[in-house]
Image (tube, grey):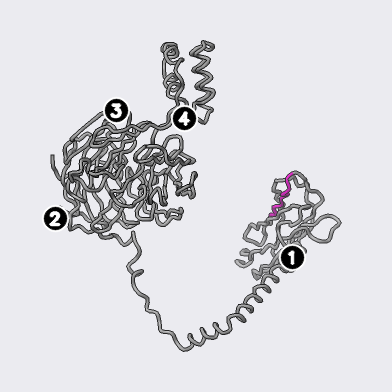
C-alpha cells in the first residue's frame, strides 16, 4: 500500500509540494499494526546479500503479545513471539570470520537474545541478585508452617514499603493473589528457593578495539538495579561493571573499549551521568530541570530532550551550550546521519504529528505526518542509503526516502546567529599615536603595574579605615557586637507638614532578651519639631520586631528637607549601639499653600 501520507517544509515553515520536497513518500501503511519505540528499531544486512532489513521489537497492541518482526521492504519477512516486552534492539559484529554478517541482539526482560542469520544463537541472562534476608526468613518460616499465609502477606507488604531492595517475583506474585488462592500458592512455592532477578532497561553497542563501521563491538546494558554492564562479544561474559545513582533509561557511547571510551547515561532521577574507561562511578553529572525523553550524541555534543518540550545541547563535561523550545511535547528522538554529505542531525518526533530535524539549534526540516510519531530510524534500507522509517501511535508504518539532490539549509534567522555576525568589522588602521603608546606600555610595563598595585592597596586601606570608623561610631543600622544584637529599620509616612516616623527595632539574638535601651533623635530644630526626642524602649523579646512610632512636624514653608539621626543608646553609656539616618521628604502640604 503506497500513498502520499505526509508533507514536509523547510526551516522557515513554508509549505512545499512534491516537486521541491526533500523526501519521497515510498510507503504508507496505516494498518501495519506496529507498536514500538526508537530503541527497538534497527537496520542491518542480516544475510550479507546487500539487502538491508528492518528489525522491529514490537510491543503489540496494548503491550500484549510482544513479537520480533523483520521487514523486507514493506512486507513482514519473519515474525516470532517474545517471552517479555522488548527493551532495545541492536545489531553488531561479534567476530572477524567471513562472511561478515551482523548479529542481532534483542533485550527483553532479564535476557539478551542473540540471533545469527535470524536463528537463535545464544541467550545471555543477567546474574541473579541476592534476596532480601527478611524475605528469605519469612519464606523459610512458611516452609516450616510457622506462619499462616495471611501473616506472610502482611509481613511481605511491610518489607515492600520499608526495604530499599525490591521483592522477588515469587513474593510479588503472592501479594497479588486473593485470600482463597494464597494457601495453594504457598504450598506450591514454599520449597523453592527465592530468586531476585533484575531486568534490562536500555542497551547499545561499543566498539571493541577499532573504530571501523564493521568492527567487533561489545554490548552495553543498563539494568533496573542501577548498573551498567559491558559484555564480551564472543563469550558474552561481563567485561566491566559500573554503578549509577539511578536507573539508566538512555545510553550513548563513543570510543573503543580497549582504548578509551566515554559513556553517557540518562537516568530516571533527571540527571545524565558521564563515565569513562576504568571508572566504576560517574565522573561528571548533568542536572536537568525535567525528566529526559531522549538522548542523542551529535559529534561531541549531547542533545537531550526533556519533558519541558525543549532540546538542550551539552558538552561531555556538562556545560550547557544551547536550548531550543519545541512547539509540542517530544515523544521520541534519534540520529540522522547522511554519510555522503557528512551531515549529523537530531530528529525529534512531536505530539502534534510533526518531526523536526535540527543541526545544533538550527531547524533544518519539518515533516508532517497524519499521526504522532512514536519511533524513528534513519539509515540504509533495502538498497537505498538514506531512508527514514517512522511508526505512529496508531500502529502505522511510514517509509520516506531522502532525495539524492536534497540539501538541508538552515532556516529561520531567529534560531541561529544573526547574519551580521558573519560580516567582517571595518577595523581602522593603526595610527602613529597608537604605536607610540604601545611602545611606551611595553617599555614601562613594570613601573605601570607597580603604580596600579600601589593605588589598589591605598584604596583597600581607605575602605578598611572607613569601615572601622563606621563600626566604632555605630553608624550602621545593624549592631556589630555580639553582646547587643540589634537591627533598626526606619520608615516615613505622610505628605506633610506632619509625618509619621516608625522605627522597627528587633532583637536578633536567639534566647536573650534586651532591656534598658533608649531612643534619641538628633535634628535641626529650625526645620522639624518632635513631641518626644528622647524615650525609653520596652523589653525586647528575641526574634520580634517592635514598631516605635512618633510624629514629625515640618516647620519650613519652603519645602526644605533635612536628615534626622536616630540613635539607639544603652543606659549609662554615651556611645550609641547603632544609628540610622532618615532622609525626610519635602513637605508637599506647605509647598501647596
In the figure, residue 476 lies in which quadrant?
bottom right
Which mark is first along the chain, 2 or 3? Answer: 2
- Residue pointed to by mark 1: 468
Tag of residue 129: 4
Residue visible at 38% across and 55% down in the picture: 300
Q: Can you tell which of label 3 and label 2 is closer to the viewer?
A: 3
Foreground residue among 447 and 549: 447
Which mark is first along the chain, 1 or 4? Answer: 4
Local secondary structure at mark 4: loop
Callout 3 touching callout 2 (CB < 8 Å)? no
Residue that protrudes farthest toward the right in the picture: 572
Quadrant where the N terminus is found in the figure: top left
Local secondary structure at mark 1: helix
In magenta segment, residue 503: yes
Distance between the Cα atoms at labels 1 and 3?
Answer: 78 Å
Which mark is first along the chain, 4 or 3? Answer: 3
In the image, 139: left or right of 479?
Answer: left
Distance between the Cα atoms at labels 3 and 2?
Answer: 42 Å
- Residue pointed to by mark 2: 19
x and y, in percent, of residue 311 in the image: 37, 50
- Tell me where the magenta segment starts and ends, as one range: 502-510
Callout 3 touching callout 4 (CB < 8 Å)? no
Amino acid at each position: 500500500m503506497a500513498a502520499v501520507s505526509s508533507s514536509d517544509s523547510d526551516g522557515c515553515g513554508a509549505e512545499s509540494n512534491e516537486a521541491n520536497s526533500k523526501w519521497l513518500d515510498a510507503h504508507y501503511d496505516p494498518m501495519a499494526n506496529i507498536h514500538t519505540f526508537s530503541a527497538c528499531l534497527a537496520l542491518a544486512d542480516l544475510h550479507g546479500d546487500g539487502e538491508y532489513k528492518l528489525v522491529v521489537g514490537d510491543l503489540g497492541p496494548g503491550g500484549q503479545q510482544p513479537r520480533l518482526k523483520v521487514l523486507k521492504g514493506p512486507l513482514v519477512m519473519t515474525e516470532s513471539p517474545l517471552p517479555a516486552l522488548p527493551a532495545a534492539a541492536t545489531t553488531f559484529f561479534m567476530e572477524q570470520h567471513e562472511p561478515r554478517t551482523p548479529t542481532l541482539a534483542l533485550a527483553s526482560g532479564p535476557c539478551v537474545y542473540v540471533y545469527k542469520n535470524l536463528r537463535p544463537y545464544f541467550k545471555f541472562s543477567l546474574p541473579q541478585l541476592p534476596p532480601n534476608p527478611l524475605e528469605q526468613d519469612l519464606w523459610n518460616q512458611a516452609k516450616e508452617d510457622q506462619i499462616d499465609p495471611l501473616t506472610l502477606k502482611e509481613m511481605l507488604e511491610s518489607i515492600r514499603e520499608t526495604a530499599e531492595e525490591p521483592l522477588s517475583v515469587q513474593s510479588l506474585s503472592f501479594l497479588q493473589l486473593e485470600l482463597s488462592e494464597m494457601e495453594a500458592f504457598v504450598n506450591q512455592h514454599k520449597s523453592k528457593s527465592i530468586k531476585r532477578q533484575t531486568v534490562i532497561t536500555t542497551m547499545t553497542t561499543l566498539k571493541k578495539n577499532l573504530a571501523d563501521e564493521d568492527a567487533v563491538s561489545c554490548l552495553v546494558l543498563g539494568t533496573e538495579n542501577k548498573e551498567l554492564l559491558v559484555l564480551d562479544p564472543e563469550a558474552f561474559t561481563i567485561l566491566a561493571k559500573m554503578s549509577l545513582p539511578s536507573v539508566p533509561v538512555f545510553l550513548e557511547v563513543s570510543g573503543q573499549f580497549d582504548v578509551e571510551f566515554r559513556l553517557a547515561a540518562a537516568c530516571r532521577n533527571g540527571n545524565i551521568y558521564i563515565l569513562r574507561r576504568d571508572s566504576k562511578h560517574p565522573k561528571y553529572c548533568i542536572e536537568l530541570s525535567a525528566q529526559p525523553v531522549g538522548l542523542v550524541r551529535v559529534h561531541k555534543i549531547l542533545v537531550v530532550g526533556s519533558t519541558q518540550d525543549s532540546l538542550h545541547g551539552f558538552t561531555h563535561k556538562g556545560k550547557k551550550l544551547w536550548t531550543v523550545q519545541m512547539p509540542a511535547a517530544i515523544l521520541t528522538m534519534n540520529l540522522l546521519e547522511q554519510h555522503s554529505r557528512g551531515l549529523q542531525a537530531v530528529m525529534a518526533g512531536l505530539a502534534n504529528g510533526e518531526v523536526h530535524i535540527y543541526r545544533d539549534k538550527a531547524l533544518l526540516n519539518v515533516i508532517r505526518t497524519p499521526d504522532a510519531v512514536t519511533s524513528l530510524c534513519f539509515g540504509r534500507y533495502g538498497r537505498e542509503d538514506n531512508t527514514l522509517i517512522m511508526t505512529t501511535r496508531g500502529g502505522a508504518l511510514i517509509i520516506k526516502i531522502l532525495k539524492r539532490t536534497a540539501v538541508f539549509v538552515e532556516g529561520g534567522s531567529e534560531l541561529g546567529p544573526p547574519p551580521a555576525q558573519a560580516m567582517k568589522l571595518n577595523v581602522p588602521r593603526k595610527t602613529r599615536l597608537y604605536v607610540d603608546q604601545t611602545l611606551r606600555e611595553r617599555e614601562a610595563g613594570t613601573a605601570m603595574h607597580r603604580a596600579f598595585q600601589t593605588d589598589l592597596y591605598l584604596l583597600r586601606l581607605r575602605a578598611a579605615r572607613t569601615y572601622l570608623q563606621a563600626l566604632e561610631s555605630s553608624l550602621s543600622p545593624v549592631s556589630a557586637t555580639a553582646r547587643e544584637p540589634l537591627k533598626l529599620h526606619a520608615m516615613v509616612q505622610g505628605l506633610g507638614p506632619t509625618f509619621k516616623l516608625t522605627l522597627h527595632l528587633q532583637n536578633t539574638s536567639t534566647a536573650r532578651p534586651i532591656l534598658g535601651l533608649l531612643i534619641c533623635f538628633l535634628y535641626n530644630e529650625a526645620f522639624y519639631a518632635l513631641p518626644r526626642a528622647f524615650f525609653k524602649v520596652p523589653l525586647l523579646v528575641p526574634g520580634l520586631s517592635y514598631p516605635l512610632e512618633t510624629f514629625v512636624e515640618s516647620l519650613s514653608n519652603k519645602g526644605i528637607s533635612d536628615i534626622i539621626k536616630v540613635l539607639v543608646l544603652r543606659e549609662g553609656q554615651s556611645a550609641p549601639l547603632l544609628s540610622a539616618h532618615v532622609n525626610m521628604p519635602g513637605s508637599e502640604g506647605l509647598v501647596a499653600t
